[in-house]
Image (cartoon, rainbow, N blue to C red):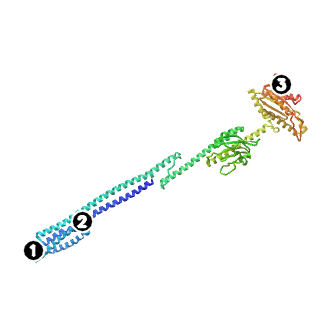
Amino acid sequence: MSTITNWAYGATVILTLASGATMLMASGAEERERAAVAQRTVFDQLTATLEEDVYRLTEQARGYAITRDPSHLIAYRRELQDERSVEQRVSHLKDAGANETELAALRQALHWADALTDEQQAAIDAASKGNDATARTILFGDEYGRELDRVAAQVGKFQYMLDQRTSHAVERATDSARQWRSMSEVMLGITALLFLCVLYFVLKQRILRPVVRLSDVVTRLAAQDFAAVPPDFSQVDEIGDMAQAIRIFRENGLERQRLEHERDADRTMRDLLSRLTQRLQGCATAGDLVDVVRRFAPEIAPDYPGRLYILDQRRNAMVQACEWLSPAQSQVEFAPLACWALRRTQTHRPNGEMIDIPCDHLAGATGLSTICIPLAAQGENIGLLYYEEPAVSTDERRERTGKYLEMLAENIGLALANLRLRDALRDMAMADALTGLPNRRQFDILYQTLATQSRVEGLPLACLMVDIDHFKRFNDSHGHDAGDAVLRAVGSALGDSLRDAGHAFRLGGEEFVLLMPGFTLDQALERANQIRHHLQNLRVEHRGGELEPVTASFGLAAFPDHGAPEKLLQTADAALLRAKAEGRDRIMVATRRESSAVA
């Protein structure tokens, strides 16, 4: 458009100059027309009195010859003097522009006029001498008349030639002026048309079209459509300023929209983290926590595969609890020292902006960007969050996601620590501090549950009461610490004898009870005999020595053989009293409802 505009400007300037030149040429032609007319006027002025003067001289000479009046002679001489001045004026006709042909005709007229003057002088001289007849013959003769006619003819010819030349010059000048005037008018018309076209083109291309485009962009931007890109008008004028202002407005709108999106995304993520926190607080077991993490972790960090590890204190190992989005690296189980995040108790990113050492649990993976976030409680590592960053990720997204992962790890660590604390408190409340077995409180809860289950489902349930024989003698003979050693040994033996097929409890003092769900009476009796023999072979060391052998009395009751499951404890306790009454170190089975007791 700039090239077209420049060419249009150039053409307009050229046409304007051409129009001016034609106007000047037309003015010059008119000037030549006026010059030709003025020249014709000059020629007329110079030759108009020549013929008249010849006739006046003739009349004055004839009057003197006839009347011999001296006044005619005086007038003749004055006229002759005037004729001499006419000759001088005529001599300037060449300077005024008369050509040789015209001057030749004029010279011929002057020649005949001079001949007439000579004849007039001769007639006047004859008349002055009294020869009137000679004077009249000269002035009134046929030859004198013919000479007058010749003068008039030559003057007329000269004037005719002047008229012809002047007419031609005026006609040519008029035609030239008319042509140049027409060309000038055409040039002016073309210049005006081109100027209007250029003006329309400039108004349309430089003003109307940019304004329309800017108006469309402004309308779309006003409707929050920031995909509208304002045109790039680099010219330094109001249009360029408007385009620059609209670009700045769009950039501000895009930035505001980006901030709004970030704010909305951050609000959504914080709401998600809030729901996660609420769910984690409602978890009753580690399994519940694992399910919550498996569900929420992919939502909080999309495209970030990962794993949740929980510390197994018995084996001192980080064990995978769950995973999401199919992570490619990291072992299922590893020692805490295999992770630098657990060593340093802070987030570890070996492939981030700073060069760092990869963790050993990555199994030698290279080129993979990973994140290890420790889950700590009171300075102690209790778990680990492991993530694999996507290959394509901006620094801004990486930083924002990193903050969310830190918050996720903090919430999971806090929830896991609360679960561990809750389990520890429950163990303290439900377990016997000396033997490690569940106490009477936990027994009551589990017994009620198993009894209800057996009654509803009709499953067998056995209850075995155990009482250490002559336990008081250990305290009296060796001290209470010896009695505690015996209790610990018996508790450990009872717990190991069940092999996850039942539950052992310490009810208090030297009394223990075993609940064996799913055991029939015969199976429970067999297991009781095994426990009895195991206790007989039990050896307890105390202060470098060995205590006396340990024996116990047993009372056994089973559902459905011995009544309702809720009465098994009382029934087994009655059988235990009978075993102690009949000499201890024996197993006494409760009395059947349809037969007598058996041992």
Disc 3 to disc 1, C-alpha distance: 214 Å
Residue 443 appears anywhere in the view: yes
Quarter assignment of residue 477: top right
Residue 143 % position (x, y): 12, 69
As helix, strand or loop, the secondary structure at mark 1 comes to: helix
In the image, what residue type sits under mark 2? Thr
In the image, what residue type sits under mark 1? Thr
Disc 1 to disc 2, C-alpha distance: 42 Å
Indicate left or right for 404 with 13 as reference.
right
Answer above or below: position of 98 versus 376. below
- The residue labelled by disc 3 is 591
At horizontal 20% and vertical 64% (from top left) the residue drawn is: 160
Disc 2 to disc 3, C-alpha distance: 173 Å
- The residue labelled by disc 2 is 41
Residue 570 appears anywhere in the view: no
Disc 2 residue crowd, few under 14, some 14–19, many 20+, Cα 10 Å? some
As helix, strand or loop, the secondary structure at mark 2 comes to: helix
Disc 3 residue crowd, few under 14, some 14–19, many 20+, Cα 10 Å? many
- The residue labelled by disc 1 is 134
Indicate left or right for 248 with 462 as reference.
left
As helix, strand or loop, the secondary structure at mark 3 comes to: loop
Disc 1 residue crowd, few under 14, some 14–19, many 20+, Cα 10 Å? some
Of circles 1 and 2, the one toward us is 1
Label 3 with label 1: CB-CB less than 8 Å: no
Indicate left or right for 24 with 577 as reference.
left
